[in-house]
Each structure stands twice: as structure tokens, then as C-alpha cells.
Image (tube, helix red, strand yellow):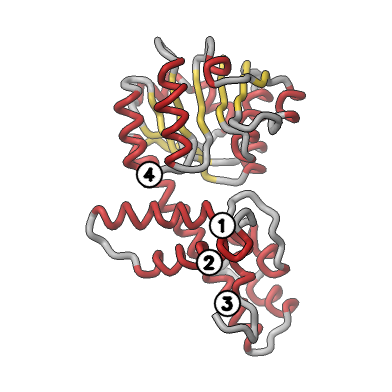
Amino acid sequence: MNVAVLGMGRMGRAIAGRLVAGGHNVAVWNRTPGKAGEIVSAGAMEAASVADATTGADVVITMLANDDAVRAVALGPLRSSIGGPTVYVDCSTVSPGLSAELAEAFPGRYVAMPVLGSPDAVEAGQSALLAGGDAGVVDRIRPVVASLSGNARRYDTAQLAMTAKLATNLMLLSEVVALAESFAVGRSGGLRDDQLRDLLGASPVLPDGLANRFEDMLTGSQDGWWATVLGAKDAGLALDVAAAAQVELPAARAVRQRYEEAASSGLRDADIAAVAQLYQVGAAH
């Protein structure tokens, strides 16, 4: 299929690379040029504009940072440049409300398909896709879905797919904070890092998603792909979903605050694992 991928952050590049490897004709675009060199070398075409990227596309995918970025692209140059049978797929993590807005703006050809997994998981075909929208429209993009992952869950609406993504993200964000605080308790009581590694790294209560960040959190690495500022954003979106149903989430509020504090303390672009650096034994917080 002819596919345009808009947004060349790490996840966008991973999606584009996977599609190129799957034999699709891929055009890519990014607001700031020059981030797609590796993908272009692999066979994609870098476009100078959204209109150029989407010309002749069967499927257009956006993978952007937040509601504002998606709204600016989707309801701006994208809506004015695509038509006919082209299907628009948003893989970004945005509010369910924006997903509903996009479904209305692109009737009969919109799918929300947020991704569960890291860029490495996407590149390996091991991510999970949460596809929300009309079943017939989802079926039309089956070759793209199959190239990206063999694990796709379907939801009746775009809003449900995005809610599922936010519920999952909140769980991992909360687990990262909980592990950081467990490290802080152990260190405060005199446990060495090697003892914490032996104790908690082998614990049966450590889930796989958290185990992937265990060593980075223990050692203070800032590498990764899910920035603290985006973690704060996602926790906030989860809170908004609950608030709309008049449900209070006090733990989620505390989790969002931790990521906001990490982002404002010089760790804005560091991976969410860097929240562990807020817990320094002997320092007041």
C-alpha cells in the first residue's frame, strides 16, 4: 500500500521503518526536516509538506506528541489535502475527545490506533495495536496493521481505543513511580544497589513492562523514548477521562505531579525512568 507517516519522532520512525520493511511504499514528513535520514536510506521518501507526503496515499498515519500537534496537522493541512478512499489513522496518544472530533472530521475513513510498546518493540513487530473505529474501515487497512504487528485489539469507537491506551499508560506510569519509591525506601534503610537489584529485580511482582526500565531506574540512566513531559501529559489525560465521569483518582494526581516535577527539574526530555532521580537519599522532597 502507499502509506504516509507524519511525525518522525522515535515512534514515527519505527512505524515507518517497519512499513518499509513490509514492502509498502512509504512517504514521511516531519515539521522539522532532517530527522528521517535512516528511514529514507531504507527506502522511504521524505516529503517537503503534508500535501506532498499524502499525494496518492491509501493510508495516512500521524504519530505526534499531543492533542495540539495532532489537531494542527489533522484539521489543518491533512484535512485539506486528502480525500476519496484515503484512510486516516492516528497512532498518537491523545484525548478521547480529540479522537471523537477526528472521527467526525474524517467520516467513514478514520481509525484511532494507539500503540502499546517501545520503538524497539515496533521495529521487531512485537508491539500491540489498539484499533478503534468502524470495522469496515479497519479492514481496509489490514495490510498495514499486519505489517506492524500480529497483535491488534479492536474497539467499536476511536474513543474506546484511546481510553484503553490511557488506562494502560497510567498503570505503567504508576508502576515506575512505585518502583522509584521502593528504591528510595531500600536505600534509606541501608540497602546497596546490588542488593536492591537481587531483591526487586527478581521479584515475582515486577511486571515485564517495568522490568524493561529497571536497570535504567537503578543506575540513573536518562536514555529511552517516553519523555517525562509526555508521561505527565498522559497521566493528565487519564485524569480527565475519570473526571468526566465524576471519578476521583488521587493516586493518579500524585503520579502526574511526580512527572511534572521531573520535567521541570531538567529531565523534560529524559525517559520516564528518570523520575527515580527525584528520590535522593538525604535530600528533602
Nearer-the-camera pick, 78 or 119:
78
| Crowd class of label 1 (few under 14; some 14 to 19; many from 20; radius 10 Å) | many
Q: Amino acid at mark 4?
A: Ser
Whichever of callouts 1 and 2 sits on the residue coming sooner in the sequence is 1
SS at circle 3: helix
Assign the N terminus to one quadrant of the image. Answer: top right
Which mark is in front, 4 or 3?
4
Whichever of callouts 4 and 3 sits on the residue coming sooner in the sequence is 4
SS at circle 1: helix
Assign the C terminus to one quadrant of the image. Answer: bottom right
| Crowd class of label 4 (few under 14; some 14 to 19; many from 20; radius 10 Å) | many
Nearer-the-camera pick, 136 or 59:
59
Q: Amino acid at mark 1?
A: Thr
Q: Using the image, determine if residue 84 lies above or below residue 42.
A: above
Q: Using the image, determine if residue 167 lies above or below residue 128.
A: below
Nearer-the-camera pick, 120 or 244:
244
Q: Rounded to the nearest whole Å, what is the CA distance between mark 1 and mark 3?
A: 19 Å
Q: Rounded to the nearest whole Å, what is the CA distance between mark 2 and mark 4?
A: 22 Å
Q: Look at mark 1 in the image and give the residue it sits on.
A: 228
Q: Look at mark 2 in the image and give the residue it sits on.
A: 261
Q: Rounded to the nearest whole Å, what is the CA distance between mark 1 and mark 2?
A: 9 Å
Q: Look at mark 3 in the image and give the residue it sits on.
A: 182
Which mark is in front, 1 or 3?
1
